Amino acid sequence: MKTLDITTAVAIAIAGGFGSVIRLFLSRWIGVLPWGILVANVLASFVMGLGLSLFAVNTVLAQIVSVGICGGLSTFSSFSAQTVEYFKAKQIWRGVFNILLNFFAPALAALAGIFLLLSLLK
């Protein structure tokens, strides 16, 4: 395993902060479900899908994008906390729907990112 140089670590931290600020603004979009957190998770997964090619081309850029931006943008803890609140409020259908959306939509977004990238590289 290669050691992480300080420049890369600082770039990842800055990118993570950028992703976190985007997530903060998105998290304010709440309707029937917490749509902002869902969008943040889907967007991070899509960017990660696109970024898979960066692993082969430029590992430092891949780390900045995947660990920094996508790591800061996506959130499992917010989604989990919101889901628990739905169950505590006996809003079972919202909790279940939130779980389903936050598991399947980001996975499909990552696949879409991979597919788009592969299509563009042909």
Image (cartoon, rainbow, N blue to C red):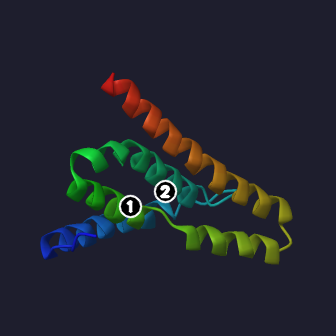
The foreground one among 31 and 106 is 106
Counting from the top left corner in percent of width and height, residue 81 is at 65, 75
3D distance between C-alphas at marks 1 and 2: 8 Å
The foreground one among 64 and 92 is 64
- Disc 1 marks which amino acid? Ile
Give the quadrant of residue 15.
bottom left
Badge 1 crowding class, 10 Å Cα cut-off, few under 14, some 14 to 19, many 20 or more, is some
Counting from the top left corner in percent of width and height, residue 51 is at 35, 47
Above or below, 86 against 50 in this view is below
Q: Residue at x 68, y 58 (%)?
A: 33
Counting from the top left corner in percent of width and height, residue 53 is at 32, 42
In this rendering, would 114 be left or right of 9? Answer: right
Q: Residue at x 59, y 55 (%)?
A: 35
Q: Which mark is residue 22?
A: 1
Q: Residue at x 60, y 60 (%)?
A: 30
Q: Secondary structure at mark 2?
A: helix
Q: Which residue is mark 2?
A: 40
